Amino acid sequence: MSAEFERLLPALVKGGVDFVLIGGVAGIVHGSARVTYDVDLVYSRTDENIRHLARALEPHSPYLRDAPSALPFRWDQKTIQAGLNFTLTTTLGDLDLFGETSGGNTYNDLLPQSFDVEAFGIQFKCVDLPTLIRLKESAGRAKDLEAIAELRALFEERQKER
Amino acid sequence: MVSFRSMDTTKIQDYMRDVDRTLLRENLKLTPAQRLEKFVKFRGFASELRRAGENARRQPLTGKARQL
Protein backbone atom coordinates (compact mmCIF):
# COMPACT_ATOMS: atom_id res chain seq x y z
CA MET A 1 0.00 0.00 0.00
CA SER A 2 1.30 3.44 -0.88
CA ALA A 3 1.43 6.06 1.84
CA GLU A 4 -0.92 9.03 1.71
CA PHE A 5 1.33 11.38 3.61
CA GLU A 6 -1.06 14.21 2.97
CA ARG A 7 -3.72 12.42 5.04
CA LEU A 8 -1.66 10.27 7.40
CA LEU A 9 0.35 13.04 9.05
CA PRO A 10 -2.68 15.35 9.55
CA ALA A 11 -4.63 12.46 11.11
CA LEU A 12 -1.88 12.07 13.71
CA VAL A 13 -1.39 15.79 14.35
CA LYS A 14 -5.13 16.43 14.63
CA GLY A 15 -5.33 13.47 17.00
CA GLY A 16 -2.83 15.19 19.30
CA VAL A 17 -0.03 12.66 18.75
CA ASP A 18 3.49 13.85 19.63
CA PHE A 19 6.04 12.48 17.17
CA VAL A 20 9.22 13.30 15.29
CA LEU A 21 9.42 12.43 11.61
CA ILE A 22 12.52 10.38 10.68
CA GLY A 23 13.43 8.08 7.77
CA GLY A 24 12.91 8.60 4.06
CA VAL A 25 10.11 11.17 4.33
CA ALA A 26 12.29 13.25 6.66
CA GLY A 27 14.97 12.94 3.97
CA ILE A 28 12.49 14.39 1.46
CA VAL A 29 11.83 17.31 3.79
CA HIS A 30 15.58 17.98 3.67
CA GLY A 31 15.74 17.71 -0.12
CA SER A 32 16.40 14.02 -0.77
CA ALA A 33 15.44 12.80 -4.25
CA ARG A 34 14.94 9.19 -3.14
CA VAL A 35 11.57 7.47 -3.27
CA THR A 36 10.23 5.95 -0.08
CA TYR A 37 7.22 3.76 0.57
CA ASP A 38 6.47 4.27 4.23
CA VAL A 39 6.40 6.89 6.93
CA ASP A 40 8.77 6.48 9.90
CA LEU A 41 7.99 8.22 13.17
CA VAL A 42 9.41 8.22 16.67
CA TYR A 43 6.50 8.71 19.05
CA SER A 44 6.40 9.82 22.66
CA ARG A 45 5.81 6.95 25.10
CA THR A 46 3.79 8.93 27.64
CA ASP A 47 0.45 7.40 28.65
CA GLU A 48 -1.42 10.37 27.21
CA ASN A 49 0.37 10.18 23.86
CA ILE A 50 -0.12 6.44 23.59
CA ARG A 51 -3.84 7.03 24.16
CA HIS A 52 -3.87 9.68 21.43
CA LEU A 53 -1.93 7.42 19.07
CA ALA A 54 -4.34 4.55 19.61
CA ARG A 55 -7.35 6.78 18.92
CA ALA A 56 -5.87 8.67 15.96
CA LEU A 57 -4.95 5.53 14.00
CA GLU A 58 -7.88 3.32 14.98
CA PRO A 59 -10.21 4.60 12.16
CA HIS A 60 -7.51 3.75 9.62
CA SER A 61 -7.41 0.01 10.39
CA PRO A 62 -3.81 -0.39 11.57
CA TYR A 63 -2.54 -3.96 11.31
CA LEU A 64 0.86 -5.62 11.55
CA ARG A 65 2.50 -5.46 8.15
CA ASP A 66 3.04 -8.77 6.37
CA ALA A 67 1.36 -10.70 9.18
CA PRO A 68 -1.30 -13.41 8.66
CA SER A 69 -4.75 -11.83 8.55
CA ALA A 70 -6.19 -13.97 11.33
CA LEU A 71 -3.90 -12.78 14.13
CA PRO A 72 -5.72 -11.61 17.27
CA PHE A 73 -4.24 -8.12 16.88
CA ARG A 74 -6.01 -5.16 18.44
CA TRP A 75 -4.76 -1.62 17.97
CA ASP A 76 -5.33 -0.06 21.36
CA GLN A 77 -3.53 1.58 24.25
CA LYS A 78 -2.74 -1.77 25.86
CA THR A 79 -1.10 -3.15 22.71
CA ILE A 80 1.03 -0.03 22.25
CA GLN A 81 2.07 -0.05 25.89
CA ALA A 82 3.02 -3.73 25.72
CA GLY A 83 5.08 -3.17 22.54
CA LEU A 84 7.57 -0.55 21.46
CA ASN A 85 8.16 -0.49 17.70
CA PHE A 86 5.43 -1.34 15.21
CA THR A 87 5.56 -1.87 11.45
CA LEU A 88 2.00 -1.25 10.37
CA THR A 89 -0.15 -1.16 7.32
CA THR A 90 -3.09 1.27 7.47
CA THR A 91 -5.70 2.49 5.01
CA LEU A 92 -3.56 5.64 4.68
CA GLY A 93 -0.37 3.72 3.92
CA ASP A 94 2.47 1.92 5.60
CA LEU A 95 3.65 3.36 8.86
CA ASP A 96 6.64 2.46 11.04
CA LEU A 97 6.27 3.62 14.61
CA PHE A 98 9.32 3.67 16.85
CA GLY A 99 9.25 4.05 20.60
CA GLU A 100 13.01 3.84 20.28
CA THR A 101 15.29 3.78 17.23
CA SER A 102 17.99 1.14 16.71
CA GLY A 103 20.53 3.54 18.21
CA GLY A 104 18.40 3.85 21.35
CA ASN A 105 16.96 7.31 20.58
CA THR A 106 13.58 8.13 22.05
CA TYR A 107 11.17 10.97 21.24
CA ASN A 108 12.65 13.05 24.08
CA ASP A 109 16.19 12.45 22.76
CA LEU A 110 15.25 13.57 19.26
CA LEU A 111 13.09 16.54 20.18
CA PRO A 112 16.05 18.94 20.66
CA GLN A 113 17.40 17.83 17.27
CA SER A 114 14.13 18.47 15.47
CA PHE A 115 12.45 21.46 13.89
CA ASP A 116 8.90 22.43 12.91
CA VAL A 117 7.68 21.76 9.40
CA GLU A 118 4.47 23.22 8.03
CA ALA A 119 2.83 21.20 5.29
CA PHE A 120 -0.60 19.77 4.44
CA GLY A 121 -2.16 22.47 6.61
CA ILE A 122 -0.53 21.19 9.78
CA GLN A 123 2.71 21.60 11.72
CA PHE A 124 4.87 18.69 12.85
CA LYS A 125 8.38 17.92 14.06
CA CYS A 126 11.06 16.59 11.73
CA VAL A 127 14.53 15.46 12.75
CA ASP A 128 17.40 17.67 11.53
CA LEU A 129 19.73 16.50 8.78
CA PRO A 130 22.86 15.66 10.84
CA THR A 131 20.73 13.60 13.23
CA LEU A 132 18.94 11.88 10.36
CA ILE A 133 22.34 10.85 8.98
CA ARG A 134 23.44 9.57 12.40
CA LEU A 135 20.20 7.59 12.78
CA LYS A 136 20.77 5.93 9.41
CA GLU A 137 24.38 5.20 10.27
CA SER A 138 23.56 3.77 13.68
CA ALA A 139 21.07 1.39 12.07
CA GLY A 140 24.11 -0.05 10.27
CA ARG A 141 22.13 -1.56 7.41
CA ALA A 142 23.88 -2.22 4.11
CA LYS A 143 20.76 -1.12 2.23
CA ASP A 144 21.12 2.37 3.73
CA LEU A 145 24.59 3.03 2.29
CA GLU A 146 23.25 4.76 -0.81
CA ALA A 147 20.76 6.78 1.22
CA ILE A 148 23.52 7.86 3.65
CA ALA A 149 25.72 8.90 0.72
CA GLU A 150 22.89 11.02 -0.67
CA LEU A 151 22.15 12.61 2.72
CA ARG A 152 25.83 13.42 3.21
CA ALA A 153 25.94 14.97 -0.29
CA LEU A 154 22.85 16.97 0.66
CA PHE A 155 24.59 18.12 3.81
CA GLU A 156 27.60 19.25 1.76
CA GLU A 157 25.37 21.12 -0.68
CA ARG A 158 23.64 22.90 2.18
CA GLN A 159 26.98 23.85 3.70
CA LYS A 160 28.00 25.40 0.36
CA GLU A 161 24.84 27.54 0.39
CA ARG A 162 25.85 29.14 3.71
CA MET B 1 32.22 21.09 11.44
CA VAL B 2 29.85 18.18 11.88
CA SER B 3 31.46 14.77 11.73
CA PHE B 4 29.59 11.54 11.15
CA ARG B 5 30.29 8.06 12.39
CA SER B 6 32.54 6.22 9.96
CA MET B 7 30.23 3.46 8.74
CA ASP B 8 32.21 1.88 5.92
CA THR B 9 33.32 5.36 4.88
CA THR B 10 35.11 4.22 1.74
CA LYS B 11 31.96 2.62 0.40
CA ILE B 12 29.87 5.68 1.27
CA GLN B 13 32.42 7.93 -0.46
CA ASP B 14 32.13 5.71 -3.54
CA TYR B 15 28.37 6.07 -3.52
CA MET B 16 28.67 9.83 -2.95
CA ARG B 17 30.51 10.19 -6.23
CA ASP B 18 27.46 8.84 -8.04
CA VAL B 19 24.85 10.97 -6.29
CA ASP B 20 22.98 13.15 -8.79
CA ARG B 21 23.54 16.49 -7.11
CA THR B 22 21.52 18.33 -9.75
CA LEU B 23 18.38 16.79 -8.23
CA LEU B 24 19.48 17.80 -4.74
CA ARG B 25 20.26 21.39 -5.79
CA GLU B 26 16.84 21.72 -7.42
CA ASN B 27 15.17 20.38 -4.28
CA LEU B 28 17.14 22.78 -2.11
CA LYS B 29 15.54 25.67 -3.99
CA LEU B 30 12.16 24.56 -2.59
CA THR B 31 10.72 24.94 0.89
CA PRO B 32 10.22 21.74 2.95
CA ALA B 33 6.47 21.93 2.27
CA GLN B 34 7.08 22.26 -1.48
CA ARG B 35 9.43 19.26 -1.37
CA LEU B 36 6.71 17.16 0.27
CA GLU B 37 4.11 18.36 -2.24
CA LYS B 38 6.42 17.51 -5.12
CA PHE B 39 6.93 14.05 -3.66
CA VAL B 40 3.18 13.49 -3.16
CA LYS B 41 2.63 14.42 -6.83
CA PHE B 42 5.37 12.04 -7.89
CA ARG B 43 3.81 9.29 -5.79
CA GLY B 44 0.49 9.87 -7.58
CA PHE B 45 2.27 9.55 -10.91
CA ALA B 46 4.04 6.35 -9.76
CA SER B 47 0.77 4.85 -8.47
CA GLU B 48 -0.90 5.53 -11.81
CA LEU B 49 1.95 3.83 -13.64
CA ARG B 50 1.80 0.87 -11.25
CA ARG B 51 -1.94 0.51 -11.88
CA ALA B 52 -1.37 0.75 -15.63
CA GLY B 53 1.34 -1.92 -15.42
CA GLU B 54 -0.94 -4.25 -13.46
CA ASN B 55 -3.73 -3.74 -16.00
CA ALA B 56 -1.33 -4.38 -18.88
CA ARG B 57 -0.13 -7.63 -17.30
CA ARG B 58 -3.75 -8.82 -17.05
CA GLN B 59 -4.31 -8.31 -20.79
CA PRO B 60 -3.46 -11.20 -23.14
CA LEU B 61 -0.30 -10.44 -25.10
CA THR B 62 -0.90 -9.58 -28.74
CA GLY B 63 1.15 -8.79 -31.83
CA LYS B 64 4.38 -6.95 -31.24
CA ALA B 65 4.15 -7.17 -27.43
CA ARG B 66 4.21 -10.96 -27.66
CA GLN B 67 7.46 -10.82 -29.61
CA LEU B 68 9.23 -8.67 -27.00
Image (tube, coloured by chain):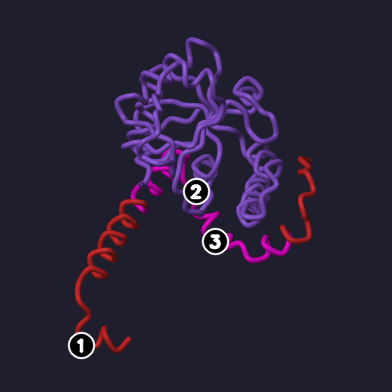
Chain colours: A purple, B red
In which chain is the residue bearing label 1? B
Cα separation between marks 1 and 3: 40 Å
Dot 3 and dot 2 residues touching (CB under 8 Å) = no
Query: Measuring 58% from the left and 33% from the top, which residue is drawn there?
Result: A127
> Mark 2 or mark 1, which is nearer the start of the sequence?
2
Within the image, what quadrant is residue A114 found in? top right
Please, what secondary structure does the residue beneath circle 3 have? helix
Secondary structure predominantly adopted by residues drawn in magenta: helix
**In-image side of A89 versus B50 (left or right):** right
Residue B4, how many percent across, how many down? 76, 44
Q: Residue at label 3?
A: B22
Quadrant assignment for the C terminus of chain A: top right
Q: Amino acid at mark 2?
A: Lys
1 vs 2, front mark = 1
Between the C-alphas of marks 1 and 2, the distance is 47 Å
**Chain letter of disc 3?**
B
